[in-house]
């Protein structure tokens, strides 16, 4: 800014220079976006057909123009549609970029999000294969000893939720419930009574404003959320987003004692739906899976093994620690009597609701009495009237030895990389429309999240275009390098 020739500059000239510096950078970024991101190449044909046929007459605003406006909104973190419209009205450069001859009303933008939410998701999904190719190419070019080597073939899953502005999310609502049960606890004089658990049990299971906002435990606190699961690769790039719908909740228990118990059940069950949907079109590209202990179950390890994952980083959850048997087994995996080492008798398999497949074995000296078994053993190993029963889980070995030794140095070093999905979720929620949704319309909320994810993928494409793959998660660095 200041010359080495010691020329005297007026205050007006200094301010003009600063204004030009701050103005030229976005213009260069728009040029970079225009030259290297070809939106039409990713828009599915079904999106074009739906957009232009649903009205029955010619559209005043082209599909690419509408999408470009939303992309600018998310890339520049413009918080509201009204402010986006003001930006476009006063910026001829944005009007030219979006190809707007006239500016759409706020209602046009709002209806676009709700009417074409599924198509916006299809746009996000259509960009995923191209992003996977970019990440794979970057990974292949890394030296073998690079810490980031192999991250393109790593899949990470985690859950989060959008927290809408509903009455039940007012802190005073829960505080008043807790206060009421604390007063009740004093009257009954019961030391075992937990007012916090009682308040949780008494709260409605969903918001009165929208049944899709469920009572849950998300991001370390208690509230009403529109919950979703997200998949990223090891570089933290969002690849798939799956919202929890009514069909998902209908398959799960309706009542829980604590929010932690509910979170475990919901998160654990969500892995099947999220991965089966994504791997249907991307199977075979991933060899390593990472998740937190909420996804620890025999069913999930069985699924991950069947999908071809060679290494699974999921810590053991204490909820499942009592499910395994400590009995010795023979070479075929049959439990042995702890006293005589005689093999137990197989008694079929069983699988209750929300339970993993179990193979049932009974004491070798069992005798059937009607519909039940008793033991004829003279020295029974357990003090029970019925026969001794034990269970084996077919996928126990893969759960205990998931392609890598637990608590090893490699485990500790690799598992730290899982936190990148938490940073990515945090970055997504910095978008104003995601951080505090101002709408109760779930279709609009989904569209906002998909647009935020699309903007993340665009940054990857631009970083690749300028040969700066290290900037693939940093839009500020890409703008500076433009």
Image (cartoon, rainbow, N blue to C red):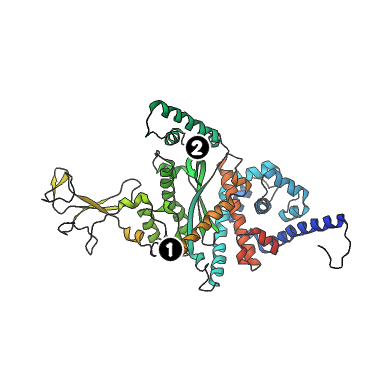
> x and y percent of residue 63 in the render?
66, 52
- Residue 416: give x, y in percent of width and height: 49, 60
Does residue 268 sit above or below 469 in this rendering?
above
Looking at the image, tell me whether mark 1 or mark 2 is earlier in sequence order: 2
**Which is closer to the viewer, label 1 or label 2?**
1
| Label 1: few (<14), some (14–19) or many (≥20) C-alpha neighbours in 10 Å | some
Distance from disc 1 to disc 2, alpha carbons, whole Å, reads: 41 Å
Percent of width and height locating residue 348: 23, 52
Residue 364 visible in this rendered orientation of the protein:
yes
Q: Which residue does the image show at 75% across and 52% down from the upper left?
A: 95
Task: Depth check: give the residue in front, 176 or 305.
Answer: 176
* Quadrant of the snapshot with the C terminus: bottom right
Does residue 55 show up? no
The relative height of residue 221 versus residue 399 in the rendered view (above or below) is above
User: Callout 1: helix, strand or loop?
Assistant: helix
Q: Secondary structure at mark 2?
A: loop
- What residue is shown at x 73% (from left), y 51% (from top)? 100
Q: Give the number of the disc on residue 411.
A: 1
Residue in the foreground of this view, choosing between 149 and 111: 149
Quadrant containing the N terminus is: bottom right
**Residue wearing tag 2:** 211
- In the image, which disc is placed on residue 37? none
């Amino acid at each position: 800014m200041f010359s080495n020739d010691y020329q005297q500059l007026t205050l007006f000239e200094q301010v003009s220079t600063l204004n030009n510096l701050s103005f030229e950078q976005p213009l260069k970024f728009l040029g970079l976006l225009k030259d290297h991101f070809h939106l039409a190449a990713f828009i599915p044909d079904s999106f074009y057909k739906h957009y232009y046929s649903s009205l029955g007459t010619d559209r005043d605003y082209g599909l690419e123009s509408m999408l470009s406006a939303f992309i600018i909104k998310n890339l520049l973190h413009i918080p509201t549609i009204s402010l986006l419209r003001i930006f476009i009205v006063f910026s001829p450069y944005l009007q030219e970029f979006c190809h707007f001859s006239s500016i759409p009303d706020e209602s046009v933008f709002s209806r676009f999000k709700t009417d074409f939410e599924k198509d916006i998701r299809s746009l996000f999904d259509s960009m995923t294969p191209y992003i996977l190719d970019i990440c794979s190419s970057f990974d292949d070019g890394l030296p073998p000893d690079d810490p980031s080597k192999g991250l393109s073939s790593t899949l990470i899953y985690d859950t989060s939720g959008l927290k809408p502005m509903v009455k039940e999310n007012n802190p005073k609502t829960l505080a008043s419930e807790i206060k009421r049960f604390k007063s009740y606890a004093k009257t009954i004089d019961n030391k075992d009574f937990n007012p916090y658990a009682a308040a949780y049990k008494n709260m409605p299971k969903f918001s009165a404003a929208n049944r899709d906002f469920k009572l849950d435990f998300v991001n370390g606190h208690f509230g009403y959320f529109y919950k979703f699961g997200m998949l990223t690769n090891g570089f933290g790039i969002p690849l798939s987003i799956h919202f929890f719908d009514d069909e998902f909740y209908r398959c799960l228990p309706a009542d829980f004692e604590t929010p932690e118990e509910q979170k475990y059940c919901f998160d654990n069950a969500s892995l099947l739906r999220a991965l089966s949907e994504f791997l249907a079109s991307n199977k075979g590209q991933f060899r390593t899976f990472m998740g937190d202990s909420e996804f620890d179950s025999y069913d999930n390890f069985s699924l991950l093994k069947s999908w071809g994952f060679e290494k699974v980083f999921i810590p053991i959850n204490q909820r499942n620690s009592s499910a395994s048997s400590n009995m010795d087994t023979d070479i075929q995996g049959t439990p042995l009597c702890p006293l005589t080492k005689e093999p137990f008798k197989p008694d079929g398999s069983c699988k209750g609701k929300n339970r993993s497949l179990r193979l049932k074995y009974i004491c070798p000296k069992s005798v059937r009495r009607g519909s039940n078994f008793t033991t004829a053993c003279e020295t029974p190993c357990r003090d029970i009237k019925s026969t001794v029963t034990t269970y084996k889980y077919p996928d126990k070995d893969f759960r205990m030895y998931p392609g890598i030794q637990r608590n090893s140095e490699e485990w500790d070093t690799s598992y730290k990389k899982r936190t990148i999905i938490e940073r990515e979720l945090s970055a997504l929620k910095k978008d104003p429309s995601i951080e505090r949704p101002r709408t109760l319309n779930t279709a609009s909320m989904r569209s906002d999240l998909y647009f935020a994810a699309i903007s993340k993928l665009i940054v990857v494409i631009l970083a690749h275009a300028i040969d700066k793959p290290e900037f693939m998660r940093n839009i500020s660095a890409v703008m500076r390098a433009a």
